[in-house]
Structures are given as structure tokens and as C-alpha cells.
Amino acid sequence: MDKSPLVQLRSGFALVITLSIIIVVTLLVVSFVSVMRLERQASGSYTSGIGSGELAYGAADTIAAAFIHEMRENSTVQDVDGREIFLPSDVGAMVPQSTLPDLAKALLPNVVRVSSSSEDGLGDFPESFR
């Protein structure tokens, strides 16, 4: 039994519709996966930026704590209107000393300086600041 031309036309039309739906669904899935991949990369970049900022704030806090510790060790502290004022106890405590090796001092005399009264440039800092 041969199928009538109308049945063959409907079968062909159904095949075209089915293939079209499969193509549209496939395109939607591929675009969703692409958008999610881009979103994951953006989230990773944002997270890295937050981590870097926290690391920088931590380093700044450590440096500020080291400076305050050094100022307290080599100064007389006065309270003025609720604020601590550090006055140097002697003139030698005010001069920054280089912490570079001798060769580096000759080449780069003003690159790295630390206020310290000791030979190694570390002063009386606690071990956590060294």
C-alpha cells in the first residue's frame, strides 16, 4: 500500500518541525552553557580581586602596627585631646637607616629605609614583624 501524497506531505512537515525544535533546543542549551561559563569566569575574577584587596589591607595593617610599635619604643607618648602624640626620646631615634646591603646602598641609596636604632635595621620589633 502506497501512502497518499497528503500523508507523505504531513510526515515530511512533521519531520521538519521536529528537527527545527531539536535545533532550537540545542541552540538554547549551548548558549546557556556559554553564558554560565562566562559567569563563572567573572565570579572567579571578582573573588581574586577581593582576595587581593584583603591581602593589601592586611599588609597595610601590619606595616601600620610595625610603625606604631617602633614609635612607642623610641618615643615619649603624650595624650592630647584623646590622641596619642609620639615625641622622639632622642635625636638618633628620628633618623631612618638603610636596610640594604653595602653594594645596593651604593647603587640605590634611597630606595628602602626603615626607622631603626639597631645595626640590622629591625630595631626591637617582635618576631612577628620581622
Image (cartoon, rainbow, N blue to C red):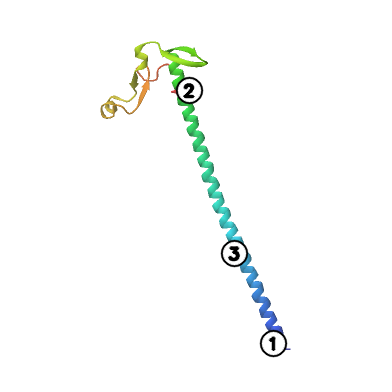
Residue 27 pos. (x, y %): 59, 64
Query: In this rendering, is residue 6 above or below 91?
Result: below
Q: Quadrant of the N terminus?
A: bottom right
Give the mark, 2 or 1, whose residue is nearer the N terminus: 1
The answer to which image quadrant residue 30 occupies is bottom right
Determine which of the numbered discs, if any, sits on residue 27 in the image.
3
Q: Find the distance from the CA under tag 2 to the CA under tag 1.
A: 90 Å
Q: Quadrant of the C terminus?
A: top left
Residue placed farthest to the front in the image? 81
Question: Is residue 74 visible in the rendered structure shown here?
Answer: no
Determine which of the numbered discs, if any, sits on residue 5 in the image.
1
The answer to which image quadrant residue 88 occupies is top left
Determine which of the numbered discs, if any, sits on residue 53 in the image.
none
Question: Hey, what amino acid is under mark 1?
Answer: Pro
In the image: residue 71, left or right of residue 46: left
Q: Residue at x 58, y 60 (%)?
A: 31
Density class for disc 1 (Cα within 10 Å; few <14, some 14-19, many ≥20) is few
- Identify the residue position indicated by label 2 in the image: 65
In the image: residue 75, left or right of residue 42: left
Query: In this rendering, is residue 29 above or below 11?
Result: above
Question: Hey, what amino acid is under mark 3?
Answer: Leu
Residue 29 pos. (x, y %): 61, 61
Q: Find the distance from the CA under tag 3 to the CA under tag 2.
A: 57 Å
Q: Are marks 1 and 3 in contact (CB under 8 Å)?
A: no
Q: Find the distance from the CA under tag 1 to the CA under tag 3.
A: 33 Å
Q: Residue at x 62, y 67 (%)?
A: 24
Residue placed farthest to the left in the image? 106
Question: Hey, what amino acid is under mark 2?
Answer: Ala
